[in-house]
Image (spheres, helix red, strand yellow):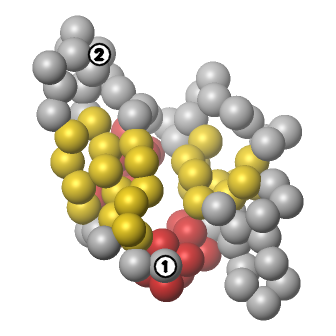
Amino acid sequence: MSEATTTRDHDEIRKWVEARNGVPASVKGTEAEDDGAGVLRFDFPGGAGEDELTHIEWDEWFEKFDEKGLSLLYQDTTADGEQSTFFKLVND
């Protein structure tokens, strides 16, 4: 069984995502003019891609993350020891 970790630490989050060649993103069509980025996600190779996600800058991603009081629940490795891209954004 693989364990999950929860964090709000920006450096820890960025290192985890970049180690998996991911980029910060938001779901297309969920942005609001006065609210900035929409529903937050990460785009990893082989994932949804830019057809469904808009890549955004880390500053914008973390601004929304902090504003919404979110934490990142993530898994380093799968049960069979492979690098995992499993994550979930959760409310504190």
**Place of residue 66 in the rendered image (x, y in percent of width and height, measured from the top left):** 43, 80
For the residue labelled by badge 2, is the local secondary structure a helix, a strand or a loop?
Answer: loop
State whether residue 62 appears in this view.
no
Local crowd size for mark 2, using a 10 Å CA cut-off: few (<14), some (14–19), many (≥20): few
Residue found 60% across the figure and 75% down from its top: 60
On the rendered image, what quadrant is the N terminus found in?
top left
Q: Looking at the image, is mark 1 or mark 2 earlier in the sequence?
A: 1
Say whether marks 1 and 2 touch (CB < 8 Å).
Answer: no
> In the picture shown, does residue 76 fall above or below 2?
below
**Place of residue 41 in the rendered image (x, y in percent of width and height, measured from the top left):** 58, 52
Q: Residue 37 — which label?
A: none
Residue type beneath disc 1:
Lys
Residue found 69% across the figure and 72% down from its top: 37
Q: Residue 82 — which label?
A: 2
**Residue identified by numbered label 1:** 68
> In the picture shown, does residue 71 fall above or below 77?
below
In the image, farthest residue toward the top: 80
> In the picture shown, does residue 57 fall above or below 22?
below
Foreground residue, 72 or 50? 72
Residue type beneath disc 2:
Glu
**Which of label 1 and label 2 is nearer to you?**
1
In the image, farthest residue toward the front: 91
Quarter location, residue 44 = top right
**Place of residue 27 in the rendered image (x, y in percent of width and height, measured from the top left):** 72, 54
Report how far apart the C-alphas of labels 1 and 2 lie in the structure.
31 Å
Q: Is residue 58 left or right of residue 17?
A: right
